[in-house]
Image: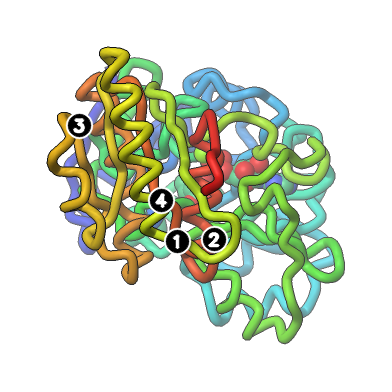
Amino acid sequence: PAKIWKVDPSDPDPRAIEEAASILKSGGVVAFPTETVYGLGAIYNLVEAVKKVFQAKKRPMDNPLILHVSSFSQVSELAVDIPLEVHELAKRFWPGPLTIVLPKSARVPREVTGGLGKVAIRMPAHNVALKLIEAAGAPIAAPSANLSGRPSPTTAQHVIEDLGDAIDGILDAGETLYGVESTVIDLTSRPPVLLRPGSMPVEEIEKVLGVKIFIPSFARGLGEAEKAVAPGTKYRHYSPRATLILVESRDTINIEKVVAKIRELATYHLGLGKKVGILCTDETRDRYLDLPAEVISLGSRRDFFQIAKRLYPSLRTFDSKNVDIILAEPVEERGLGLTIMNRLRKASSQRILV
Ligand code: TXA
Ligand code: MG
């Protein structure tokens, strides 16, 4: 089983960092916190270690990993033909939850990029992550530290549940700040393309770039991308074991209709003897409390930060209560709402429009 180091997120014990880094340098894999979710790291050019990351997660080999850097100078080791905007984006958003896709340099092993000619890079805004990368002396390749397809881990406990026996260690610095992954944009095409909405709203990135970012339908969680564009999108993602049914509105959200539909579906599935979970918001919570269902509110409908942060832990809570069916409400697709809807759609087995 994995060695666990409990560390202070702002001021981690240097001995824990050194020990974790030496495991990485000898080809091991270690989970560590970032400001988004926990990652499972390997030094990016130790190919056997990178393969262990895929094996531990049961991740398909064609779904590439993000490279985590601790200084901007490492970008020029990993990427070539770096456009000028990258400097502006880095100045404004790094360290932070923005991942930039660039043409890869020959130094990056093809195992890391799933055979693609592009590489995804970000600088995490977390002291433990930054110190680990520094101590390792090289960029760290890290996907989220969950079993492939499961909700990403926002605590070390989630990592242990999914990967405890398959990895060498975990730096435990408590709950992560955003609870949802970084925003991924591809700067190799013009206009830039959103590959995955995340904890940095697209609108903020557009302000710095001065151009609109193209948002393909797969980035909204609708349909699938071609493998060569956004490899991660072709698999079911972020999913609880339960069947998640997402109730959506055709255009602007009519919350009355959504609540009525969820009540109708809950009553139907309860009648079949199913255990039902309802994923709702503070404004609607009281409307479900008369039903014999597990009701979880993600927070106020006006607080997308809170809703995004509580989503993955709530899906895991439903699983721990052995819920069969989860019924979920939608949010508006602006700011972090785009990210929330992407994750809900990808986690869902079925979408119903009212
Ligand atoms: O917040 C995050 O991004 C977390 C923390 C640990 O940094 N990491 C994370 O990694 O979410 P992962 O592997 O779960 O998701 C990475 C996403 C996937 O959708 C993957 O397909 C995409 O980034 N990606 C990685 N490299 C790519 C590349 N070269 N071209 C296109 N997409 C890429
Ligand atoms: Mg992931």
Give SS at disc 3: loop
Q: Which of 44/261 is in front?
A: 261
Question: Which residue is at 34% across, 49% downward?
Answer: 259
Q: Earlier in the sequence, mark 3 or mark 2?
A: 3
The answer to whether 133 is drawn above or below residue 246 in the figure is below
Question: Which residue is at 24% across, 33% downward?
Answer: 317
Quarter of the picture holding the N terminus: top left
Q: Amino acid at mark 2?
A: Leu
Q: Earlier in the sequence, mark 2 or mark 4?
A: 4
Dot 1, how many residues are within 10 Å of its Cα: few (below 14), some (14-19), or many (20+)? few
Mark 1 sits near ligand 1, with its Cβ under 8 Å away: no
Q: Which residue is mark 1?
A: 254
Dot 2, how many residues are within 10 Å of its Cα: few (below 14), some (14-19), or many (20+)? many
Q: Which residue is mark 3?
A: 293
Q: Which is in the foreground here, disc 1 or disc 3?
A: 1
**Cβ atoms at labels 4 and 1 below 8 Å apart:** yes
Q: Amino acid at mark 3?
A: Ala
Mark 3 sits near ligand 2, with its Cβ under 8 Å away: no
